[in-house]
Amino acid sequence: MEGKDSVKRYELGYTTGVFDMFHIGHLNILRRAREQCETLIVGVSTDELVREYKHKSPIIPFDERIEIVKAIRYADIVVPQTSMNKMEAWERFHFDALFHGSDWKGSDMYTRITEEFRKLNVDVVFLPHTQGVSSTMLADVLRKIEEG
Amino acid sequence: MRRVITYGTFDLLHYGHIALLKRAKELGDYLIVALSTDEFNRVEKNKHCYFSYEQRKNLREAIRYVDLVIPEESWEQKVSDVHEYHIDTFVIGDDWEGKFDFLKDEGAEVVYLPRTPEISSTQIKQDIALDKRVRGE
């Protein structure tokens, strides 16, 4: 763990997510990202964006998801994410690190993004996922319990 | 410094919890959350939590309105907590209206906050069971 006065590796970090049914896994990503940067910007995917690329709606509506992320102390600035294009986000915020859960590591999209960001001296940092918890798993567990 | 305390299980984190904690914090300077232990939930509340006490505690501690999380292990501890933590204000959802007025005798102000309509863990669980929102209706 880093001490209060330690110098962070990055100045401005950026991470995004749906943060559906906010759980300990989401929290760990935000905490680990914030440990490495002075200021963390968090983009929360809008319902429209999630429908566009996941072809399903989040269980919790956007207005509630973003309010929950805003209440987390590791999230310094919280914005809606309306596009998957990380370069657009960079043009807006000029972050020096992009944080993401390691499930995206090795995907075509992230291999390309990592290359593009390297030219801009922006690091793409993958953070380990918390074992045994995800929104999908949580929804399944709840469904089974409700169905008895 | 005004100290505020609230009690709950806080299993699934939803906007209703955040709204309650935010308003609770606004009533003072320092907010303590007494979080039901797994044992207390099981034996006294007959409630099953998806997340363990430690996981629930980690999440509550990460909420910027929360200053301290303590375990809730018995129904009776509210009286001793008021004294031990020098509580000025006891806050709880208005579904408990009138139930904790006895804490006024211990010197604490008792506030019942309105629950956010239509948001509760139970409601969310029902929504999922019905699969309503998942199917985008």
Image: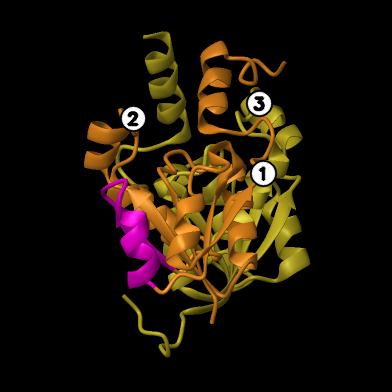
Chain colours: A yellow, B orange
Q: Position of residue A77 (x, y in %)?
A: 67, 66
The answer to whether any part of residue A128 appears in the image is no
Chain of the residue displaying label 3: A
Say if labels 2 and 3 share a chain: no
Task: Decide whether residue B103 is among the magenta residues.
Answer: no
Side of B44 where A48 appears, left or right: right
**Residue A57: mark:** 3
Question: Few, some or many C-alpha atoms within 10 Å of disc 1 (few <14, some 14-19, many ≥20)?
Answer: few
Residue at which label 2 appears: B47
A62 is higher (above) or lower (below) than B58: above
Q: Is A85 left or right of B121, judged from the image as shown? A: right
Cα–Cα gap, marks 2 and 3: 29 Å
User: Which sits in the foreground, A66 or B72?
Assistant: B72
Give the amino acid type for the residue marked by disc 2 in the picture.
Lys
Residue A28 to residue A131: above or below: below
CA gap between label 1 and label 2 equals 23 Å
Residues shaded magenta: B68-85
Residue with the most extreme bottom position:
A5
Q: Is residue A110 left or right of residue B83?
A: right
Q: Which residue is mark 1?
A: B114
> Does the rendering let one see residue A117?
yes
Give whichever of B28, A100 is nearer the camera: B28
